[in-house]
Amino acid sequence: MSVRVDTLKPGPESGQVRVAIVVSRYNEWITDRLRDGAVEELRRRLGDAGEATIIPAPGAWELGYLSACAAASGAFDAIVALGCLIKGETRHDEVIADALCPALMRLSVERRVPIGFGVLTVETAEQGEARAGGEARGGEGRWNKGAEAMGAALDALFCARAMR
């Protein structure tokens, strides 16, 4: 008896791919760089076939609601949520992260829309800056969690489409 094993190798099909980039304005010196990384990754991967709509959120807390609005609109093939939670003197960052992460996962599964998770949860501003374009892992290029979240959302989108 033999077992057949296939691995999906999805790639972008023709046509526009519309992505909502929901980005927190809080800690914007970091989140602006995450947004720019996400846009650049979309451009790198899809060229003119990629289309991004930037949806500014007041803070990380509002990322869930605005991502839900984007998903409900039916206007987007994927969503990328970007924010930066920096540890402070209280547990405020943990409360937001503990609520936001499962909310975005639930939204993604229920709406069947891939959501790239680019919300940093860091101890210091320096850690946030590093993950938004600081020194790269392995010394190649610049590491940007916004670009990584966009890549993950696109990979999930194309994989799901390949199963249809």
Image (cartoon, rainbow, N blue to C red):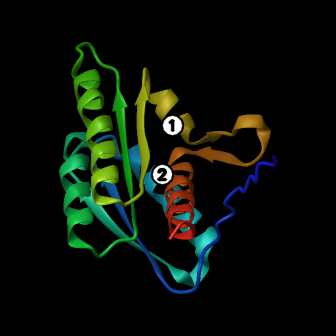
Please, is residue 78 above or below residue 60 in the view?
A: below
Amino acid of disc 1:
Glu
Q: Residue at x 28, y 63 (%)?
A: 55
Q: CA distance from mark 1 to mark 2?
A: 9 Å
In the drawing, what numbered circle is on residue 129?
Answer: 1
Can you tell which quarter of the image residue 52 is in? bottom left
Q: Residue at x 40, y 70 (%)?
A: 77
Residue holding disc 2: 33
Q: Residue furthest front?
A: 1
Q: Mark 2 and mark 1 in contact (Cβ < 8 Å)?
A: yes
Q: Nearer the viewer, residue 9 or 95?
A: 9
Residue 33 in percent (x, y) is at 48, 51
Please, is residue 151 above or below residue 143 in the view?
A: below
Amino acid of disc 2:
Arg
Q: Residue furthest top?
A: 89
Q: Point out the tag, 1 or 2, that comes first from the N-terminus.
A: 2
Q: Residue at x 20, y 66 (%)?
A: 72
